[in-house]
Every structure is written in C-alpha cells, then in structure tokens.
Image (cartoon, rainbow, N blue to C red):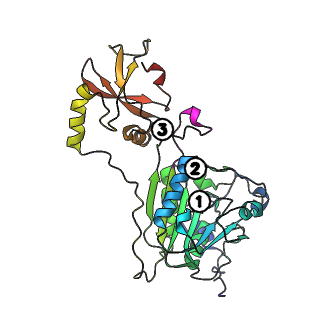
Amino acid sequence: MEEPRALKKNGGSSTEKVLADDHLFSEDAFSRSDESDDSIFYTTDRFVQHLDSLALATVEKLIGDLVIEENPVILDLMASWDSHIPSSLRPQRVVGLGLNSNELSKNPALTEWCLHDLNKNPILPFANDTFDVVLNVVSVDYMTKPFDVFREVNRILKPGGLFLVIFSSRMFEQKAVKIWRQSSEEERILLVEEFFSRDGTFTRPHLFESKGKPRPKDDKYAHLGIPSDPIYAVYAEKKGDMRQQRPRPSSAEASEYPPDPEELRRRKEAVKHTLRCPHCELTLRKWEVPQNPFTQWDVDFMYVCFNDECPYLVQGWEVMKQQGNSGISYRFTYNSYRDRCLSVPVPHLHALKEGIID
C-alpha cells in the first residue's frame, strides 16, 4: 500500500504558515478555551444526537443526493456512532476515523474504523487516491489545523471525489476553535470555503442551506417555539480527470416560493374572498387582537396564517436576521375591516396562538 505523503517539514504545517502570513487570521484563531487532550475529552461516550430529527433527515438526504458514485468507498472523518449515510447508497466500504472506540464500534454504517487525533497529527493514515467520498458532519469547528486536514483529504480522494462538510449552530463551545465561536453563521460558511480554496486543489466550493423550518413537535426543545437546527454544507470535488463522471445534482432545496409576482398579487387580492394565505394557500384563522396600552389596532380581530411551515414565516427568520433583528420572524395577517394584507412579528412559533378564536 502506498504510504501517505507527509506534509511539508520546513516551516511547520500549512495552518501554521497561514497564521504567520495571512492577516485574516490572528495567531490564536484556532485555539480553544479548553486545550486539554482531545483523546481524554472524547473518552466519555455520547450516544446522543446533536441535531433535531428534521435536521438529521436533511443531512441524510443531502448525502444521498450528492453521492452519485456506485458502491462508493467512503471516509467518515471525525466519526462517532452515526454516519448519517442512507442505506440506498450501498457503499462498498465505509471507514470511520474518530477518537472514541465505543462509539465507533457501535456505528452500524462502518465496515472498519481507526482511532486518530487530527489535532495532534493531521496526516491521514491512508494512501493517495483511496476514497470516492469524504464526509465531515458537525465537526469542522473542532479542527485546530484545518488547512492541513483539507490538504490531506484532497490527497486521499480520487480525482473527482467529493468532500462534503456539514455543520450547524450547535457545538461543544469549549472545544470549538476561537475563530468559529466568534464568527456569525454566514462568516462560518466563508471560513469553510477558505479552507477549500486555499491550495487550489479543489473545484469551486458549492453551498447548501436549510434553516427556519419548524422544530419537530416531539423534540425536547419544541416547547420553546424555536426553529429546527439550521443545516449548512460546503462541498467541492478534487480536481483531476473527471471526464468519466456524471455531474452531481444541485444541492439547492426545491422550492416554488416565492411564486410569480403576478400570481402573488392575484392571491392577495383574493384573500378577502378566500381567507387563504397567499404564500402557502392554507386557510387563515380568526385571531383576537390583544387589547392593552401597547397595541394600536382599531379592530377586535384579524385573520392570521398559523401554518408553522408557511414559507413566508420560514424565510422571515433569515430576512429579519439580515436586518439586525435575530430571533424574530413574521406571520401573514389580513385586516378584513380595512381590506389590508400585513405582517405581524413573532419571536417564536407559539406567539399569537393564545388569541386564536375557534
């Protein structure tokens, strides 16, 4: 078997070079608040999911959509007890690389596994051009030498092979690197794109986002009315001879929203007759306007869309966040007295529902 190619010895690792030469990163950018030995920290078994069930389903579907190779050879990088690989892929081989032997041994997707601390030694123990796909799910925020790791992943991928990096907003903060903790979710996307682009050995990175969806009703945080965990993915292929490979499908979530502007205008004009939301076309519910010194409504009730999956509400979380109002969205509302369509802000999915008139 071909031995792994070592990283450059002169001048330290590529991450160390970046920190020394690049003004974008401070010297402690990849430090952690807890610098204790990772192998000790991860000795504790954690047979729990770190994302809600809808987010996990999104991860599995994304992997199934993007992995187009027949019987692929897959590496789950920084693996645990669940690799989120759909059974429909029928991989020839799945290797898990992680730090907890109990978790890895109980991962049903793995055909083999090994213990390896990437933060101590980013050189991967595999030969060149070994894998069709490398997955990294909710772990990139813990890499202290990401540029070295991404270079190594490129080495062990076959030409045209896929490196798929998936992350969310949840983490072990004490083990996440400083630059990740201090970055916004949008900045984290740019950061992972930089990891891919630095050496020019990957194709142009692509992006996937899924956020603002209602949290599953059986989730332990559902009572808080907060949206489902967001899912972000940045992925690219190893450059090389890819003539024999069919193109990967787009990762963009299928959406028919917003509808054609003329169609949306027509729906809004029809609300007074249909009492249906023009964005999701479900029936509006009669809502009693709260009467207190802080309200300025001159009506006793209005009609509100209480569909938690309405695209107007789902996309509203991001729209408001971009305007500096994080944690707020809005519901479509119709004032029948004035024949006016408007929006009412909501801080969570439970807001306003106490005023529904059956």
* Residue 100: image location, x then y, percent: 75, 62
- Nearer to us: label 1 or label 3: 1
Q: Which residue is mark 3?
A: 326
Q: Is residue 39 left or right of residue 318?
A: right
- Nearer to us: label 2 or label 3: 3
Magenta stretch: give its range.
218-230
Residue at 51% across, 53% down: 58
Q: Which residue is mark 1?
A: 84
Q: Would you say the residues marked 2 and 1 are in contact, meaning their CB atoms lie under 8 Å apart?
A: no
Of residues 206 and 177, the one drawn nearer to the viewer in this rendering: 206
Among numbered discs 2 and 1, the one appearing first in the sequence: 1
Compared to 348, does 194 lie above or below?
A: below
Residue at 63% across, 54% down: 178
Compared to 219, does 232 lie above or below?
A: below
Among numbered discs 2 and 3, the one appearing first in the sequence: 2
SS for dot 1: loop
Q: Which residue is mark 2?
A: 182
Tell me where residue 346 sits by quadrant: top left
* Residue 28: image location, x then y, percent: 64, 58
* Residue 95: image location, x then y, percent: 65, 71
Q: Residues within 10 Å of mark 2 (few under 14, many from 20)?
A: few
Amino acid type at mark 1: His
Amino acid type at mark 3: Ser
Q: How far separated are the C-alphas under marks 2 and 3?
A: 16 Å
